Amino acid sequence: MDELAEDVTEFREVLTKRHERVRELNSDYDTTRAQFDAFLKQVNTEIQASQQRVSKTHRAFIAATTPEEWSQLSKVRTKAMTATIKSMQAI
């Protein structure tokens, strides 16, 4: 669970930095299309790497629990994910 919490914390920080960078690029009238494209390409690469990390962690959680344990964690997991999504939407 610590790995997942760290991933979420890191994601919040990255998301905040991305928003700041978009504002910087958008507010600079001299920003070129190539700069926007490079930024978006970088973000896409980071997202893919993050998805792979989270997927790996998720598979490890599944492997470390029994089906019964995983089922019991479902409600808690749903509440945690809902709270995480709401907190990220507030950024």
Image (cartoon, rainbow, N blue to C red):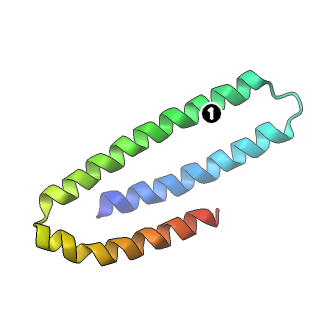
Residue at 64 percent across and 45 percent down: it is 18
Find residue 41 and report its image quarter: top right
Instruction: Give x and y (percent) for residue 89.
Output: 61, 64
Residue at 58 percent across and 51 percent down: it is 15
Quarter the C terminus occupies: bottom right
Q: In this image, 16 relative to 7: left or right?
A: right
Is 63 in front, or is 27?
Answer: 63
Q: Amino acid at mark 1?
A: Leu
Quarter the N terminus occupies: bottom left
Instruction: Give x and y (percent) for residue 70.
Output: 19, 69
Q: What residue occupies the far right of the structure in this picture? A: 29
Q: How many marks?
A: 1
Q: Which residue is mark 1?
A: 40
Residue at 80 percent across and 24 percent down: it is 32
Instruction: Give x and y (percent) for residue 77.
Output: 33, 71
Please tell me whether mark 1 sits on a helix, a strand or a loop.
helix
Mark 1 burial class by Cα count in 10 Å: few <14, some 14-19, many 20+: some
> Is residue 43 positioned above or below 73 on the image?
above
Instruction: Give x and y (percent) for residue 34.
Output: 72, 22
Q: In this image, 75 relative to 67: left or right?
A: right
> Is residue 32 positioned above or below 6 on the image?
above
Residue at 44 percent across and 37 percent down: it is 48
Is 85 in front, or is 53?
Answer: 85
Q: In this image, 2 relative to 20: left or right?
A: left
Q: In this image, 83 relative to 36: left or right?
A: left
> Is residue 75 positioned above or below 88 on the image?
below
